Image (cartoon, rainbow, N blue to C red):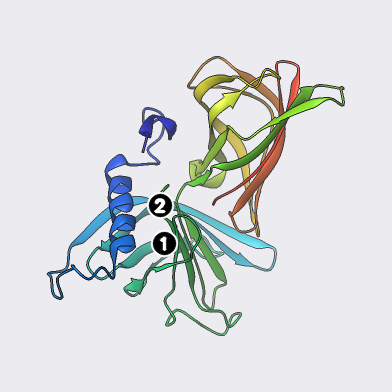
Amino acid sequence: MDYKKHFNTNNITIKEAYFFFLVIMFGATLAACGHDDEPEEQPDEIQTSEIDFYSRTIKGNNVAFLSHKGTVVLNYTKGTIQLTSKYNDFDGQPHTFTTGEMQVAYTGDGTLYTFRDPTMQTDYDGSTSVGLFDTATGVILYTFNNEIGKIFTTTYLNFPSSEVRIGKIGDSYFITHDKSEFLFAPVDQGSKCVLQINNFVADMSGNVAADVIQFMGLPMTSTPNGYTIVADRAESTYGGNYTITDVNISINNQCRGIYGSYLCNGYKIEFAAHLY
């Protein structure tokens, strides 16, 4: 993995290279399971890592957000994952939860795995827990419910599968490309966010103007479906001197997708992407 293409830790600690190296190795371990030459018995190889989590508690149209440190325990031998994380209730009080040791199963889609803890179920909506884990990016999503509401917990978000179109403002002609990758994480306890674009294309040449560009402190609102990011103007804080205006971005489908638009140097840039 090329770590220069991910969040600049000089600005914000979102992605820790060591943990995500372990994630990739975990994926390789899962892919190797079932080979005849594996030993029948071996001691459990376990790694515990502390990472940033972002939780939204949802009940109807009400949303309670919490940014915090949580832990991920990867058991390479058993192919399991265990999470310890937090969430806020609607009085602003944090609660901690720890899942059971959850078996990770391949979805058949690229590097995406799923997991669940069937014991984490209550009468709120009758659903059991659901987790998704992309071993290529290290992105984790986990959902469960309790008497307070529905809790959605994620790591930072990485949207590599993008569709971008760029056109002159006021002109109907545009070009399309799929070079850019969008990364996102909340800051300031959910009032703002950092948006990073890898392979940033700024005009209709289609050429990459910056390998990595980052915007800090964009105003953000938590919603029952994800997040919205709206800003009149934002200046890049890393990767070159760029100004974007009329920023209007929605992270939807419980953080599985992103779409939006902004203006830059006389061009309108529209994009849509998903996690995997």
Count of marks, rendered view? 2
Q: Are marks 1 and 2 in contact (CB under 8 Å)?
A: yes
Give the residue at mark 1.
Answer: 86
The image shows residue 89 at horizontal and vertical percentages of 52, 65
Q: Which residue is found at the position 31% from the left and 55% from the top?
A: 28
* Residue at mark 1 to residue at mark 2: CA–CA distance: 7 Å
Using the image, determine if residue 211 lies above or below residue 247: above
The quarter of the rendered structure image containing the N terminus is: top left
User: Which residue is nearer to you in this view: 246 or 169?
Assistant: 169
Give the residue at mark 2.
Answer: 68
Residue type marked 2:
His
User: Which residue is nearer to you in this view: 4 or 117?
Assistant: 4
Q: On the picture, is 204 further left or further right than 28?
A: right
Is residue 242 visible in this depiction of the protein? yes
* Among the two numbered marks 1 and 2 on one chain, the one whose residue lies closer to the N terminus: 2
Report helix, strand or loop for mark 2: strand
Residue type marked 1:
Lys
